[in-house]
Image (cartoon, rainbow, N blue to C red):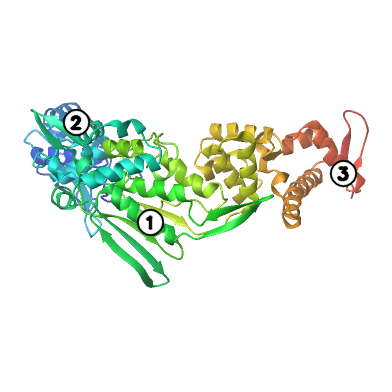
Amino acid sequence: MSRSIPSQETLTVEFKSDLKKYNDSNLFEDVVAFANTEGGDLYLGVEDNGTITGVHPEHANPVTLGAYIANNTVPPISTRCEIIEDEKPVLRIAVAKSYGGIAATRSGKILRRRMKIDGTPENVPMYPTEMATRLSDLRLLDYSTVLVLEGSPADIDPLELERLRKIILAYDGDKALLELSNEELLLALGFTREQNGVVYPTVAGILMVGKVPSIERFVPTAASSFQALEGTSVRVNEDYMLPVLAAIEKIIGHLEVWNPEREIEMGLFRMAAPEFDKRAIREAVVNAFCHRDYSIMGRVRVAVADEGLTIANPGGFIEGVTVKTLLTAEPHGRNQLLADSLKRVGLAEKTGRGIDRIYEGSLIYGRQLPDYTNSTPKTVSLFIPRSRPDIQLARIISNEQNRLGRPLPINTLLVLNTLKELPRSGMKQIAEAANLSEAVVKAVLDKAIETGLVEAYGAGRGRNYMLSHTLYQDKAQKIGYVRQKDIDEARYQEMIVNMARNADYIARADVMNLLHVNAGKAYSLIKDLVNQGILLPVNKGRYAKYKLNI
């Protein structure tokens, strides 16, 4: 009989010997640690090396044990307990990941799981800073709203308030804010808040417009850096402990120097195309500051090198967001107050879809896409590669946007880019490559076909798509288009010949079923093969049959 129990421990699998009855207090701690990490399965009756020794009789009742665990955890943790009949009976306790907050034992112990250097798991205490990170990951805590009770309005820098007002004017922020006094402005943005008749700054206030000594005292994690490298030579290497607005201005100023432009022709016009789209990199830098985890040490790091631009910040993606769902997940920042204030002053995308802007900056030029794959549970890392623009694709996107009088939706840009990289792709293949649902891809393709951006070949499941011939303006590009189109025709003819070789006769209906094409297309393909002398008609009319000419 095959073994139904895992053979080794992982972050989500734990073995416990139950020969001498495993201690109940330790059991509750294990369950809490699972809930505070990724959830998982605890097996009672299995040794650390995977040997099955059986569950103790006092733990053999899954119903009562589940209730016992719930009564000794806060909030009560619901588990699914079951006896697994293997070599000997084993109790499996399935623990779900806690999304409602941090779990503890009734005695007040709070633990989490982690992997040791040797690759085995362990339970360790969860410290206060880790609790703040955990709650912000779960969208249950906005650290930027926390009052700095040891601070006062004197920690706010008037010069930074002037910088904020200038940014509102320069970036078309909320002009109503300019009518407010400094005290009213701080309250309106949530940078200060009154408690028991006393006005205190918030973490967001200290971060955005605080004096440098106050930032160093109250939010010592708010560091950032900029590096510029040429080969192995470091041309710029600066570290900052500045208010967020000043740090963003400093970094953007550096990037202006290291972001050369080239001109690309757009019909009768020329357009300047920087290596990194300016709006995209501004949004990426702003995102790094407003979504970083300020409860842990680290720094926002911006580095430009020969290969491209890296923007990284401490704190992984919040719950529900992954590399694959970046463009589809509901927008929600780790520090919502900080993010809202950056939107109101005009630096951040007001819709909360700054990630769309980052992707759009590459897509409109037909460049390689931004890459988040180096991100970890502790860090978000964005890499924007240096790459040459695709002039033809940039031209067709520009022309279509001019025709519409508005930018193309991000999903349309993603599908066009995918078809550039994967011509003659089916809908499923496009959806997987673009990380979009097939329903979204179908809607985009239908609209793109209607407007002439995309052409479709075949029918049903065999339907493929490629960029329209309008993309191919010069001779070399037209040759590419014809080659791609003719590949379909040659492949269809080959498939028909193979079918005829393995059958006495074939009919038009057989070709339609084989290639998922309509009757007219099937007849045209058969007629071409007859004209070439490859197929012979056996009879004529609506139900004509054909055989291979051998």
Give the numbered dot on residue 77: 2
Of residues 109 and 509, the one nearer the viewer is 109
The residue depicted at 61 percent of the width and 55 percent of the height is 264
Of residues 118 and 148, the one nearer the viewer is 148
Q: What element carries label 2?
A: loop
Tell me the kind of residue under disc 2: Ile
The residue depicted at 23 percent of the width and 60 percent of the height is 118
Labels 2 and 3: the sequence-earlier one: 2
Disc 3 marks which residue?
528
Q: Nearer the viewer, mark 2 or mark 1?
A: 1
- Gap between marks 2 and 1 measured at Cα: 51 Å
Q: What element carries label 3?
A: helix
Q: Which of marks 3 and 1 is in front?
A: 1
Residue 163 lies, in percent from the top left, at: 29, 46
Q: Are discs 2 and 1 less than 8 Å apart at CB?
A: no
- Gap between marks 3 and 1 measured at Cα: 63 Å
Q: Quick one: label 1, few (<14), some, or many (20+) residues within 10 Å?
A: few
The reply to whether residue 46 is in sight is no
Disc 1 marks which residue?
253
Tell me the kind of residue under disc 1: Gly
Q: Eyeballing the image, is 8 above or below 338?
A: below
Of residues 70 and 6, the one nearer the viewer is 70
Q: Quick one: label 3, few (<14), some, or many (20+) residues within 10 Å?
A: few
Labels 2 and 1: the sequence-earlier one: 2
Tell me the kind of residue under disc 3: Asp
Q: Eyeballing the image, is 231 above or below 424?
A: below
Residue 94 lies, in percent from the top left, at: 25, 36
Q: Is mark 1 on a helix, strand or loop?
A: helix
Task: Determine whether, in the image, residue 311 is placed left or right of residue 504.
Answer: left
Of residues 541 and 206, the one nearer the viewer is 206
